Amino acid sequence: MLNQAKSSADPHRTPAEGTLAPSPTQPEVDQRPHPAALARSTKADEPLYTIRIVANPGTQCAACGKQETGCGPVGFLDDAAICDLCLLEGSDELGMVLALISVVRAYANVRGTAEEWQSALEELGAFARIYDRFAAKTGPARIIKFFRENDTTN
């Protein structure tokens, strides 16, 4: 239980160096930073990975300097474009989102026999299971409805 006598400000105590002594009109304020503020300052020091849409052709990856970054959805480390592999290494969730885009586009461009379509569909399904393992770390699946329920034109 909290002891009010010990927890109230002691008027005879000398304030710590660099702090103001409490005045009779102003109560003593706890100078320690709030834990949430500490968490924010720590996160600000961490690299920020994002995906942005880039219209111009790719540039050299700012992380490895070896790969081109491409255009369209591109990974960024802070404000510099990075290649897909560096994004995957730095942020596996965002890297997998770009990989998902690549796999879906590759499937959309399959031309050929029924066997080739079946093989592509099996690869798409395998990647979907892998992607779900990564995505499950951040929460349950969301269903995004692209069309209205009563829209019959799709």
Image: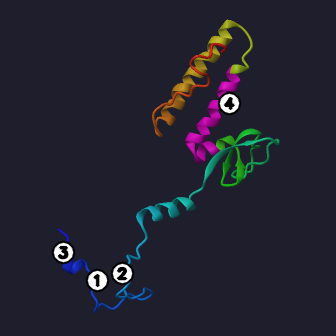
Q: Earlier in the sequence, mark 2 or mark 4?
A: 2
- Give the residue pinned by disc 3: 3
Q: Helix, strand or loop at disc 3? A: loop
Task: Assess disc 4: are there few (<14), some (14-19) or many (≥20) residues with their C-alpha within 10 Å of its C-alpha.
Answer: few
- Residue 2 vs residue 41, the one in the foreground: 2
Tell me, yes or no, whether the highlighted magenta stretch contains residue 143: no
Distance from the alpha carbon under mark 2 to that under mark 4: 58 Å
Image coordinates for residue 16, horizontal then vertical, percent? 38, 87
Q: Helix, strand or loop at disc 4? A: helix
Distance from the alpha carbon under mark 1 to that under mark 4: 63 Å
Amino acid at circle 3: Asn
Q: Which residues are magenta?
A: 87-107
- Residue 2 vs residue 134, the one in the foreground: 2
- Give the residue pinned by disc 2: 28
Q: Earlier in the sequence, mark 1 or mark 4?
A: 1
Tell me what residue is drawn at x 20 percent, y 71 percent: 2
Tell me, yes or no, whether the highlighted magenta stretch contains residue 95: yes
Q: Helix, strand or loop at disc 1? A: loop
Q: Nearer the viewer, mark 2 or mark 4?
A: 2
Distance from the alpha carbon under mark 3 to that under mark 2: 17 Å
Distance from the alpha carbon under mark 3 to that under mark 1: 12 Å
> Is 32 situated above or below 151?
below
> Is 119 situated above or below 90?
above
Amino acid at circle 4: Ser
- Give the residue pinned by disc 4: 102
Q: Earlier in the sequence, mark 3 or mark 1?
A: 3
Badge 1 vs badge 2, beta-carbon distance below 8 Å? yes
